[in-house]
Amino acid sequence: MREKWVVAAKKADFQGIARRFGIDQVTARVIRNREVVGDDAIASYLYGTLEDLNNPALMKDIIPAAGMLQEKIRKGRHIRILGDYDIDGVQSVYILYSALRRCRANVDYVIPDRVADGYGVNERLVYRAKEDGIDTLLTCDNGIAAFQEIMLAKELGLSVIITDHHEVPYEEESGERKYRVPPADAVVNPKQPDCPYPFKNLCGAAVAFKLIQVLYREMGFPDEEALVYLENAAFATVGDVMDLQGENRIIVKEGLKALNQTKNYGMRALASRNQIPLGAIKAYHIGFVLGPCLNASGRLDTAKRALLMLLAEDERQAAEYAAELYDLNASRKELTEQGVRQAKELIGQMGLEKDKVMVIYLPDCHESLAGIIAGRIREQYNRPVFVLTKSEGGVKGSGRSIEQYSMFEEMSKCKELFTKYGGHPMAAGLSLPEEHVALFRQKINENTSLTEEDLRGKIVIDVPMPLSYISKELAEELDILEPFGKSNGKPVFADREIEILSLKILGKNQNVCRMQMKSADSAVLPAVYFGEAGQFLAFLEEKYGSRALAQAMEGAGGGMKISAVYYPEINRYNGREDLQIVVKNYC
């Protein structure tokens, strides 16, 4: 079933917006499609600065948490940061550890091992903290779901501060939600129902950054000093796939400016190893190049390696860690491809494509890769996917969802099957006994209200726009919409009856299709398609025949026409700047 194409039909005075803000009407339409409404919101979207960020002091418990840390530092008490092994967790630990050392705190950190410890606080880590003489546990990017573990820590006499951004667990009683917030001394999480902080969708590192802003103010440091950690909060915001709207957009936009001038040896070395020059780093590079290197450390080795890279105090040491992370990521890619192939084979063998929610059990898969594989399968089948793997003491898994399906809420409907679970609407993690796997697959599908229409892929076109309207000026203007990411995707346009004048297949893997295309009103532009080039050629051959395809590949036309979803860009190469379109989808 091919995806359906729909045109965003948002209404606004596009002429007026274009005139007031000095932008093209096309750009105004794209901004409206991102649910940015009203002149104040548009101004913030286009020109928002650090001055537009919310006051961190508005966050519930953040002032008591900062005051408590200040007191512990003054008394020389031993503070232990307890983080997580993904991008957000590593950056959160880095922010807190570096900042607390700057405050001359007696501080260390523990990042749980993904396999040995699992996610977040566990009893073993709590007992270990007590044995090590720890006075205060400070969590980051975790802790909100660790009710029993935090209770144990308090019973053992530890002080506990939670900083987190995940959903607060709840129980349904008579149709009413009863939230279970752990009994910590302070809980800093904007997702708490009674937290007055106006923006709820910060990542864990951004919450940590906000705490340090308040702590630094309490300790008399200039506000500018805390801003050194803005690049880390931005990196984590993109890496944890947060919505790039509102405050997150400003954090990433301003954080990227800082990242492109970073003085951090580890960040500089990682960019260099991936051949990305400072000044050229975009959100894309964090999401698909640099971020996966940090994640690979926690997946296949230990996340401490990524943290040590960020903490490196000279270029040589940083370069060594960066090279190790680069190599780990290469191994991760290879193992992922193996896992995706195995998952597809199992889907075919068990007929799982008939399920509205896929539960795929790959016992021998490295558990750290389950989430990546689930994401890849979700992209192909456009349905929620859980990938489960065998682990010590049972089965662990990760899920990746689609917009129409809140994974955390749906899992809550069969929570009796899990020994542990948590997450977001779009992603989740779980542990369960092996004998519950089949029952989980059954229950999660029985409970779902997903329809066949929900499972059909959808491409939302920002503006139907003929190729003749594209100009270099418009392509450059669209750059002001950066940074692109979740909820602020790169804009897409569409045109129909575009003739393919010539066609070549390029690339080491023969997966790049370069074309000359002519619109119905005779505009001619170069075009490129990155994807399944073989499938594209098969589509053209089936529709127009092998002779027409051969003619196009010889540069002699052939009369083949397609409708295309695309975006315009300026291809900069060897000092030249050429306008071209990038084809995303076709029919």
Image (cartoon, grey):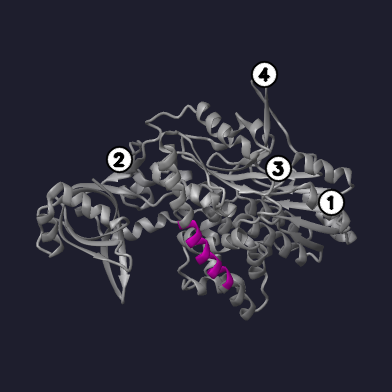
Res 196 visible: no
- 282 vs 548, left or right, is right
72 is within the stretch colored magenta: no
Q: Tell me whether circle 3 and circle 2 mark residues in contact (CB < 8 Å).
A: no
Q: Disc 3 or 4, which lies upstream in sequence?
A: 3
Q: Which residue is mark 1?
A: 127
Residue hosting label 2: 2
Q: CA distance from mark 4 to mark 2?
A: 43 Å
Quarter of the image for residue 532 reads bottom left
Compared to residue 122, the image places residue 195 above or below, namely above
Specify the amino acid type for callout 1.
Tyr
Q: CA distance from mark 3 to mark 1?
A: 19 Å
For label 1, the crowd category at 10 Å Cα-Cα, with few meaning under 14, some 14 to 19 and many 20 or more, is some
- Between the residue at mark 3 and the residue at mark 2, the CA separation in whole angstroms equals 41 Å
What element does badge 1 sit on?
helix
Report the residue marked by disc 4: 174
First in sequence, mark 1 or 4: give its number.
1
Tell me whether circle 4 and circle 2 mark residues in contact (CB < 8 Å): no
The quadrant holding residue 482 is: bottom left
| Element type at mark 3 | loop
- Residue 380 horizontal/vertical position (percent): 39, 46
